[in-house]
Image: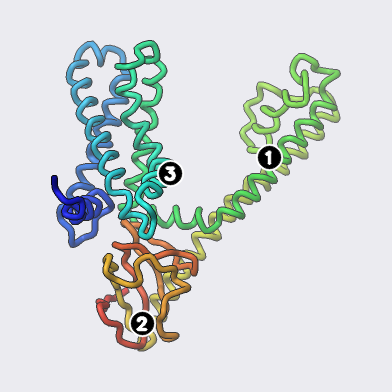
């Protein structure tokens, strides 16, 4: 029986292959490209099933392609579970597996192939299981990690999450309040339309979000006046999250521009360090790093994503740490930004 420790290098290598690859790892990058193509092919097959006659003319081919792509999804998920511990340094293996399985990407991975095989054991639920095909579309979010321009969107939404949640909460409160008010104003005139306090939710949603379908509308004078007020208020409410996101983009690009200009005008060296499992920085929070005051971490590149360096962020094996410094750092590679 082979020693478990003898397969650890293999597991580590598989983990680096199935994760977002780096430019200097040809096999990993090739897997990323193949993975993306499989997702797109599976999506094309799912769309083809919606056309009349497509299943009758080339149903066998579509079934074979779907079976092959779903089998690939299952194998990919199994490998990610097998190598989960390398994505959580310092964690017990079962905790790392649970963290992956119950994460958004883990749930999407499981739902990408399990509903395909479940009808074998539960034939009566075949129709319901087919509805989960749509979940495979969410695998396209993995492509987001391959493009820095798309990663900026993710970073902006993450950095402005609290402000966005606050604005959404305010909009929800206004929707409920406007629904209650409209019920009070219109119930006597339209009892079949505004039958209870929550029957006006549809009206308040379409009005506050400035959609205005026109299927539900007030007929009383006070109801019309209140509707005008809510419409103007809705324009401002929709502008709040839009402004927050716009400000996030400005902050993100201004930060990158300031760093670039500072490096061009000052005697500063931009350095990139690729962390391995032997580096003492791996598994350490940024605030706990022992670095010079003349050295500042600019950003962290993790599996193709650009992360904002906060003090609580824990560096992991495979991360690329980009920093600028006026002193020499061992194991660092000078780069230009």
- Kindly indicate whether the residue at mark 2 contacts the one at mark 1 (C-beta within 8 angstroms): no
User: Which quarter of the rendering shows the N terminus?
Assistant: top left
Residue at 34% across, 52% down: 145
Q: Work out how far the residue at label 1 is from the one at label 3, CA to CA, in angstroms.
A: 27 Å
**Label 1, on which residue?**
172
Sequence order check, earlier mark of 1 and 3: 3
Tell me where residue 297 appears, x and y as whole percent.
41, 74
Position of residue 254 relative to residue 1, above or below, is below
Tell me where residue 38 appears, x and y as whole percent.
23, 36
Nearer to us of marks 1 and 2 is: 1
Callout 3: few (<14), some (14-19), or many (20+) C-alpha neighbours within 10 Å?
Answer: few
Tell me where residue 320 appears, x and y as whole percent.
31, 66
SS category of the residue bearing label 1? helix
Q: Nearer the viewer, residue 163 or 214?
A: 163
**Label 3, on which residue?**
103
Q: Work out how far the residue at label 1 is from the one at label 2, CA to CA, in angstroms.
A: 47 Å
User: Which quarter of the rendering shows the C terminus?
Assistant: bottom left
Q: Work out how far the residue at label 3 is from the one at label 2, CA to CA, in angstroms.
A: 41 Å
Residue 89 left/right relative to 332 = right
Callout 2: few (<14), some (14-19), or many (20+) C-alpha neighbours within 10 Å?
Answer: few
For the question of whether residue 211 can be seen, the reply is: yes
**Label 2, on which residue?**
264
Position of residue 117 relative to residue 286, above or below, is above
Residue at 37% across, 79% down: 324
Sequence order check, earlier mark of 1 and 2: 1
Nearer to us of marks 1 and 3 is: 3
Q: Nearer the viewer, residue 2 or 302?
A: 2
Position of residue 293 relative to residue 237, above or below, is below
Q: Nearer the viewer, residue 191 or 70?
A: 70
Position of residue 149 relative to residue 36, above or below, is below
């Amino acid at each position: 029986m082979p020693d478990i420790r003898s397969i650890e290098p293999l597991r580590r290598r598989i983990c680096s292959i199935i994760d977002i690859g780096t430019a200097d790892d040809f096999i990993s990058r090739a897997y990323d490209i193949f993975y993306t193509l499989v997702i797109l092919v599976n999506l094309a097959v799912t769309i083809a099933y919606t056309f009349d006659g497509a299943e009758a003319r080339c149903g066998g081919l579509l079934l074979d392609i779907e079976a092959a792509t779903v089998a690939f999804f299952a194998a990919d998920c199994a490998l990610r579970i097998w190598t989960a511990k390398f994505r959580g340094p310092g964690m017990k293996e079962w905790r790392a597996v649970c963290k992956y399985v119950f994460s958004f990407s883990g749930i999407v991975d499981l739902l990408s192939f399990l509903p395909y095989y479940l009808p074998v054991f539960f034939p009566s639920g075949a129709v319901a299981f087919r509805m989960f095909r749509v979940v495979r579309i969410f695998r396209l979010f993995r492509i987001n990690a391959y493009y820095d321009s798309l990663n900026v969107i993710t970073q902006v939404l993450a950095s402005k999450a609290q402000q966005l949640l606050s604005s959404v909460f305010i909009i929800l409160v206004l929707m409920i309040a406007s629904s209650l008010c409209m019920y009070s104003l219109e119930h006597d005139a339209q009892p079949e339309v505004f039958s209870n306090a929550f029957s006006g939710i549809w009206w308040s949603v379409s009005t506050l979000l400035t959609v205005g379908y026109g299927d539900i509308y007030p007929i009383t004078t006070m109801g019309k006046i209140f509707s005008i007020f809510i419409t103007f208020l809705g324009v401002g409410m929709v502008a709040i999250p839009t402004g927050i996101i716009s400000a996030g983009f400005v902050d993100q690009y201004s930060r990158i521009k300031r760093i670039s200009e500072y490096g061009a005008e000052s005697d500063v060296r931009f350095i990139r360090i690729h962390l391995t499992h032997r580096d003492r920085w791996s598994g350490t929070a940024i605030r706990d790093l022992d670095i010079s005051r003349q050295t500042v971490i600019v950003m962290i590149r993790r599996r193709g994503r650009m992360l904002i360096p906060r003090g609580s962020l824990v560096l992991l094996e495979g991360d690329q740490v980009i920093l600028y410094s006026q002193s020499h750092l061992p194991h660092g590679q000078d780069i230009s930004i």
